[in-house]
Amino acid sequence: MTVDPSQEILFEVEGQVATITFNRPEAMNAMTWNLYDRLVAYCDELDQRDDIRVAILKGTGDRAFVSGTDISQFQAFSNPQDAIDYERRTGEVTGRLERVRKPTIAMIHGVCVGGGASIALACDFRYADPNLRFGIPIARTIGNCLSLAGYARLVDFVGPAKAKELIMLAKLLNADEALSLGVMTEIVPAEQLETRVREVADRLTTLAPLTLAATKESIRRILSARALDSQEGEDLILSCYMSDDFRGAVKAFVEKQKYTWTGR
């Protein structure tokens, strides 16, 4: 069953805690363009509402947090600007999530890959169950690449050597690996995950909001101080997105076929 676009992402408030739910369980909560746009709108609402002190992000069901961008959408890419606009837009979305003044918590059941991994890393805290599979396996799936900002965020968390291992070997971290690398804040039994995340959220509502906001913004500014120009790396984006391999791999993925890489 396909979820109505207006219901692809849900926004609910209980007490001082907002919950944003990615609601496409039939697609393992893969992100549509509408979903990305609505997430930004909800980030704006979080900052505008004084009654909200904390936000929880989660996916519907126990299979996935977010399984990445819905790959069927890439079939519409026809020119270089499509690729540049996509990486710029998704970068703006995760950047907006990082700039939310309230604390954000990713509650992760199961798969958290691709765009889902980027969204989770943009949150302040990440709590996952033992079924976690975390990574950005683009070298195995459709042969695209990240923006430099996307690579930088991953390097900030795991370092350059591990970032190469994750991307270049298309490796997915399990729960223990993600915890040991500091990618996850805590691993919690699946049946206790929602309760644990709510406990953390409730604790955050009791702490000084200006201290929390200043701390997260200070750290964000420190990390962004060495950011490259937003246009830096566009040649690399085009080298992947405009390739025969990318077009062929997207088609094969949608048709559930295996693709043989050509390097062209």
Image (cartoon, rainbow, N blue to C red):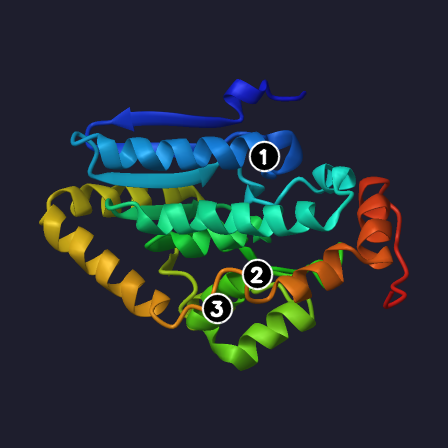
Secondary structure category for the residue under label 3 = helix
Q: What residue is shown at x 76% (from left), y 37% (from top)?
A: 76
- Residue type, numbered disc 1: Trp
Q: Residue 147: which numbered mark, if any?
A: 2
What's the distance in space between the residues labelled 1 and 3, CA to CA?
23 Å
Left or right, 242 with respect to 52, comes to right
Q: Position of residue 135 (x, y in %)?
A: 58, 60
User: x%, y% of residue 110?
Assistant: 55, 48
Residue 7 on image: x %, y %: 51, 21
Q: Helix, strand or loop at disc 1? A: helix
Please identify the quarter of the rendering in which residue 219 is found. bottom left
Residue 51 seen in the current view: yes
Q: Residue at x 57, y 61 (%)?
A: 147
- Does 6 appear above or below 58? above
Which image quadrant is residue 125 in? bottom left
Residue 110 visible in this rendered orientation of the protein: no
Name the residue beneath numbered marker 3. 152
Q: Spatial distance from mark 2 to mark 1, Cα to Cα?
A: 18 Å
Q: Quadrant of the N terminus?
A: top right
Query: Which mark, residue 33?
Result: 1
| Residue pictured at 28% horizontal, 35% vertical | 46
